[in-house]
Amino acid sequence: MAKYSDIKGFTVQTLSTDTIASQALGGSWASAPSLNTGREHSGSSKNGTTSASIYFGGYPPTNPRRAETENFNGSSWTEVGDLNSGRSNMASFGTATAAISSGGSTQPGVNVASNENWNGSAWTEVGDLNSARRELAGLGITTAGLAVGGTSGSALVESWNGSSFTEVGDLNTGRANLGGAGTSTAALAFGGNGPEGETETWNGSAWTEISDLNTARTGTGNAGPVYTDVLMFGGTGSTVVANTENWNGSSWSELNDLSTARTALKGSGTSASALAIGGGYPPGATTEEWSAPAVFNQIHEGQLYFNSTTNTFKETLTDLAGATWASGGSMNAATYGNYGAGTQTAGAEYGGNAGPGQSNTTHEQYNGSSWTETTDMSTGRREGIGVGLTQASYLAAGGEGPGGNISNNESWNGSAWSEIAELNTDRRRLNGGGAFTAGLVFGGYSTTIANNTETWNGSAWTEVAELNAGRDSIGGGAISTSNGLAFGGQAPSTTAATESYNGTTWTEVADLNTARYGLQGTGSNTAALGFGSATNSPYAITENWDGSSWTEVADLSTGRGSGIAAAGTSLAALAAGGWTGSARSDATEEFTVSLANKTITSS
């Protein structure tokens, strides 16, 4: 019997706009009423709204610093009560009826500690900062906030309790002209002079480095009272920019640009509705209003729809062509030949080469933004392979120590390392992966180049079908004892050969596009990622395996090889450490593949 859908077809959803991942990604900037007095390096009520915000202080093209305060009611700016002292480059936070202006500069080179409180009609001097400084960031409300960083790259942070400031934990990296958002116990600091792309989070007691901005810069404006949802815009990188980014609690995403590129501006509002005020060289009066849709269609893989505005059919796909590597938190110790396990956001790296003939016992775990040192391994080793898909349990299989190939393997149970059953063939520069109780390792170098394959069942290793060609410094990935991919290596010359394992046999499949050895990989025989190489000038090349062929995708930021610790999948991978050709690396990079709406065409 014929299917109804074969006879009648099926309905394709009609949408007026493309699907998007978040509300902020659907936003855009539009012109708003200008200030009465154009200024830069001013203060604003960051927690204000697009119908109730204030903008104060700063300076126009010539001195003196300004004291004017202007109030925005949604349709125009009106001058209201002045600051008690004209200032620029101050920390500012609060609302249109309850704001704080802390520190700043009254004239070139003169920093102040003065702190003023706005009650909706006038400014009153209250408890000063402990350290006079300018170019600092402010965040919070009038009864609880933070003054962060400042002059000459200060790392100083002071907490405001409504009547006085108290020094609290310093930033990891001191900065001036930075941005800040959140509360006195849950905050975000980003950009600024120095390492202009860095982002740090505050938990009420300490700062932690996390994902960098997509466009490194200083002198940005920002809006958003919640540190997990921040809108940031403008600033100066290599040039003055109009870029807008949104922080969603774990990463920054590029949004629609400001209409006018400018720096030293201020913001007010949220990621859904905000103002970008003043700023620029020379200082301007421009105001722009950001609006994001209250209702939007969430993006999901596999969607098929008709966009009635652009008159196109769209399909939502995993966008490998748009995939990227992004910098993550640096390891505590630079190394290469290290082991990797876990996932992109919950990974581990251990062992490795700390210097000529030196094998590490060090062990670090990654939380998606930073590495933490934890219990060392019992035996120093390098150039082996990690087996395990979580941070709770993984293996260090094979490798080399000061005396040669390692005979013992070690197991991590979440709190301690234990020696476990040996491989049947001791070797180094092997590869593999899989689960803690279902692992697969292959290739490497024993006394000669090895083609051995072994599976792990949680207690013992078993020899299974050999690779068709033995290979040293081999790349690979596996997710179980019956699903693995081996590629590249030296056999004995450099090769691009790829073999797929199904639990019984190895089958030769399509070659890598670029022959290389000392590369690393993640994934399985149906979806894998291969990256890096070991040469005097290591490759940054990354290739994606779709089950039948390899495709070149985004390169690593830095060519690395000779054992990069790897974790994750072909769509969300982690690469840590490695040899750059001249030095050990402490770099971490995260490979991310997003969804994209692709137009369907016919021919």
Image (cartoon, helix red, strand yellow):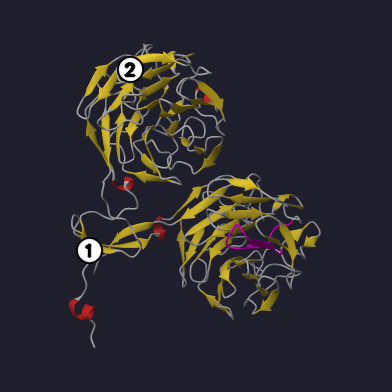
Q: Is 12 or 193 nearer to us in this picture?
A: 12
Left or right, 462 with reference to 269? right
- Magenta run includes residue 277: no
Q: Main secondary structure of the magenta part?
A: loop
- Magenta run includes residue 388: yes
Magenta stretch, residue numbers: 381-398
Q: Is 54 or 266 nearer to us in this picture?
A: 54
Q: Is residue 342 above or below residue 245?
A: below
Which quadrant does the N terminus fall into?
A: bottom left
Instruction: Name the residue located 51 percent from the left edge and 31 percent from the top edge.
Output: 194
Q: Which mark is residue 13?
A: 1
Mark 2 element type = loop
Q: Mark 2 is on which residue type?
A: Pro
Quadrant of the rendered image containing residue 441: bottom right
Q: Is 470 or 75 nearer to us in this picture?
A: 75
Q: Which mark is residue 427?
A: none
Q: Could you tell me residue 81's position as x and y percent?
A: 29, 14
Toward the bottom, the furthest residue is 1
Circle nearer the viewer, 1 or 2: 1
Mark 1 element type = strand
Earlier in the chain: of badge 1 and badge 2, it is 1
Q: Which mark is residue 60?
A: 2
Disc 1 versus disc 2: distance between alpha carbons? 53 Å
Toward the right, the furthest residue is 403
Q: Is 17 or 127 nearer to us in this picture?
A: 127
Q: Pointer 2: residues within 10 angstroms few (<14), some, or many (20+)? A: many
Left or right, 519 with reference to 452? left
